[in-house]
Image (cartoon, helix red, strand yellow):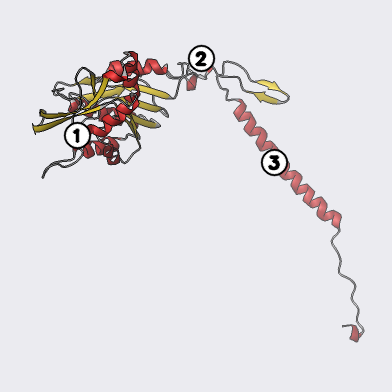
Amino acid sequence: MASLGLSFPPAAKTPTYLASSSSTFFSNSSLSIRTSQYRSRNSVFASVKCDMPESLNVENGNPSIPIINERTLPKFLESARMEKSVSRTSTRLKLFSGTANPALAQEIAWYMGLELGKVNIKRFADGEIYVQLQESVRGCDVYLVQPTCTPTNENLMELLIMVDACRRASAKKVTAVIPYFGYARADRKTQGRESIAAKLVANLITEAGADRVLACDLHSGQSMGYFDIPVDHVYCQPVILDYLASKSISSEDLVVVSPDVGGVARARAFAKKLSDAPLAIVDKRRSGHNVAEVMNLIGDVKGKVAVMVDDMIDTAG
């Protein structure tokens, strides 16, 4: 183009003040429209008033919400449950008792400084068991005291239903406290075609929803392995030792007796705690269930105080 000797004037530029003024115009227009819409919405919301018992206090330009106590809720939120005041000192540990041994559970609660939880347990005419918790256990650590002693089947079924009730009530953790563990003697097969009922009971308690089991002086330590949940196996030996110590019996006049050969290890450990007292063993034979016959006595018990140690006393024969 320059070689032809032609020249063109530079292109005209749009004045910057026109562009800026046009953008300012449109932004001001949109701002005015939004402001009008906001005012219209505020006018609509201003016509709706909550029925609050007290007006909001404004401090430093920020509204402060009043503390809601008991009856100061709006009417649309009031309910029978809201009217009840919540105790802030309530513990998150709950202790309930079955019908097997309520006196034991009451003494445990007294020792721990707690109150027994309220539970409704009754039986229908056909023998079915009904359990209903009378207080909330949501998010609580629940302990159920229920030995499965005689009648074993009823107490065991009652325990299972109590565990299920706590689980369905959204308890955080359920611990079954079983001082006397029924069916513990059936922990192995001694003859053909026998059941291992201890394993079956462990499965029932686990499937019912228990998170932990606390048992005392199990028939054999292998029973703990039957559970798929943690088991706390505690021993009553310290309590019995304190009782014997209160009797002021001389260690020379004391002998610990094992009622059978299988309990020798238990009796020896007990005798060691009694200033290494002497040990005696009863050799007995069983011709049937709950039938025992003494064959021999190993050890000297003449003129001494005999303390017989056993994990389970059924007939005391």
Q: Looking at numbered disc 2 in the image, what kind of residue is underneath it?
A: Arg
Nearest to viewer (mark 1 / mark 3)? 1
Residues under labels 1 and 2: Cα distance?
71 Å
**Residue bearing mark 3:** 33
**Residue bearing mark 2:** 71
Residue 3 numbered tag: none
Quadrant of the image for the N terminus? bottom right
Residues under labels 2 and 3: Cα distance?
43 Å
**Residue bearing mark 1:** 261
Are there few (<14), some (14-19), or many (20+) residues within 10 Å of tag 1?
few
Asked whether 53 or 299 is in front, the reply is 299
Classify residue 41 as left or right of residue 159.
right
Asked whether 128 or 107 is in front, the reply is 107
Are there few (<14), some (14-19), or many (20+) residues within 10 Å of tag 3?
few
Q: Position of residue 79 (x, y in %)?
A: 44, 19
Q: Does any portion of residue 19 appear in the rendered image?
A: yes
Asked whether 104 or 141 is in front, the reply is 104
Quadrant of the image for the C terminus? top left
